[in-house]
Amino acid sequence: MAREEDPLPATARLNGWLEARYEFWLARSPLQQAYLGLKTDAGKWDDIGDARRKDDLDKVQQELADLKDNFQSVNLSPAGSLSYRLYDDRCQTLINEFPWRHYQCPVNQVDGWQQEIPSVMMNVHGVENVEDAQSYVARLQAITPLIDQVIESMRLAESAGILAPKFAYEHAIRDCRNVISGAPFDAPLGSSPLWADISGKIDRLSLEPSAQQKLKSDAIRVLVTSVRPAFLKLIAACQAAEQRAGTEDGVWRYPNGGTYYASRLAYHTTTEMSAAEIHDFGVSEVERIHGEMQALMQKIGFSGDLKAFFAYLKTDPQFYFPQTPEGKAAYLARARSVTDGMSRRLDEVFLRKPRARLIVRPVEAFREQSATSAFYKSGGAFDNRPGVYYVNTSDMHALPKYELESLAYHEGIPGHHMQIALAQEMDDLPRFRRFADHTAYSEGWAVYAERLAKDMGFYQDPTADFGRLSSELWRACRLVVDTGIHMDDKRWTRNQAMDYLAENTPNAMGDIANSVERYIVDPGQATAYKIGMEKILALREDAKARLGEKFDLRGFHNAVLGVGAVPLTILSDVVEDWIKETL
């Protein structure tokens, strides 16, 4: 029987408990502190060793027990009940994911440590004073034990029967070499990425020349004596793993691979859809979108079939910026113009707008050959660091003009930047909710944002509207390809997956190759986009049908974005509550 307790004091007590738990976990993660713009442990990295992971599991299991013992049977406010459900879900997810901790290669080309380390130093670790510069050097020094843990993680994974495909190690080796190429390692090659970064940051400090030189000398010493040997050690480990790695791509090749893939799909989609259901849904959506494309192709005035139109889009120079510094700058300028244009009209469809700035920036040279065509990195919640829409300008043929609008809406505004920045700025939510991430929610919102721009009257150029459909088609094809690669009864090879995308989309082969490799090393993630978008659209259409004249798009968006990132099952309940309140 539930204890009688006033909901507000009970909710306040829960919120206090949640804040204490957030502080506990934040204190264990210098990297999370850095991303939030905090400098508490600015000279450190996270402990990623297996002993820490096991200790984390013990802590999460105890948390879950405490949560249920103290708050399961008390009366909470609606907001408190939602926080309870979300923290329960968080704990259950972490417990469920623990057995698979060695299944993801720690040096993959999507988010591997060989990229994360220099990216954090260059893009997250700011230097505003001498102390910041000293902590930068300390964090450089701490790369050595971090990479030792990365290598140990690789060893534990291989002992469990987990090896990434050969290409993943090839990417990692190239990334590592890029980090330690140039001064102070190889003077004739120009400045290495880390030296260019820290020396430039020191130069911008108002210091006496002798003080600046002391900081630079310390940085050079650590780069040469610690960073270079650590990355050379990682290169050697990757080379050894590459020799033992195979060329089979799907996770069906791993021990319990089918169960692991099912867990990845559940984690990323936050649904109970099976791999077969996702595959079939993808096939049907590809067919539907092809039909819409054919109708739009006729409106554009192209007389051939869809395959011929794809070939036309791939080969006609009018659809691409030139592979020159000027062409790359023109793309970035156009992307900024698109996000600025959308920003000016946000009041039409949103009740709240983010305070955080958005900037558009090219992917750094050290990782552009491995990175995807575009991605978003959130700003710092406490240091005013802006959100960044990264564009990979290494291959301008992978950035067609006709997809520029939809890509900017997805990564920037009203997509990732708007959703993530708004969540971070919600001071009334417990912090674990402000900084939460659920792939189907966040990526589903970003794809929904592409569609929302259409509803608002953007994509005036028919080829840009075709680009919107092309982007949605790409997400539908991902459902087919991801499941095709990883399902045990399909076992698609990398070439089969590439052939499917080349046959069914207008995307460039370079983009196709990079994307398929991404799906291989991050199973299930690519399925979240389309599934999340469809859920948000279905909730919107249901609300419109039930509310009639009372439906307000701004109110709907406020309901969806006003609770932070949540699983799709919980999002359905949130919108249902909003509908009932509106009625």
Image (cartoon, grey):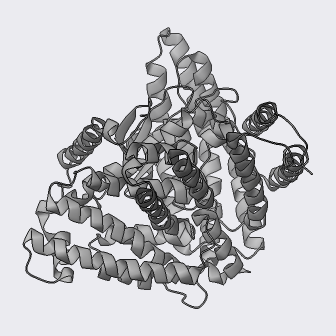
Dividing the picture into quadrants, the one containing residue 136 is: top right
State the residue in front, 520 or 547: 547
Q: Which residue is depicted at the point 72% across and 39% down?
A: 77
Residue 519's spot in the image, x, y percent? 50, 70
Residue 382's spot in the image, x, y percent? 57, 27
State the residue in front, 4 or 358: 4
State the residue in front, 303 or 85: 85
Query: Looking at the picture, does residue 360 appear above or below residue 368?
Result: above
Farthest residue toward the bottom?
Answer: 489
Residue 332's spot in the image, x, y percent? 26, 44
For residue 557, side relative to residue 17 (left or right):
left
Residue 175's spot in the image, x, y percent? 50, 55
Dividing the picture into quadrants, the one containing residue 42 is: top right
Q: Does residue 346 appear in this view?
A: yes
Q: Which residue is depicted at the point 36% across and 43% down?
A: 413
Q: Does residue 249 appear in this view?
A: no
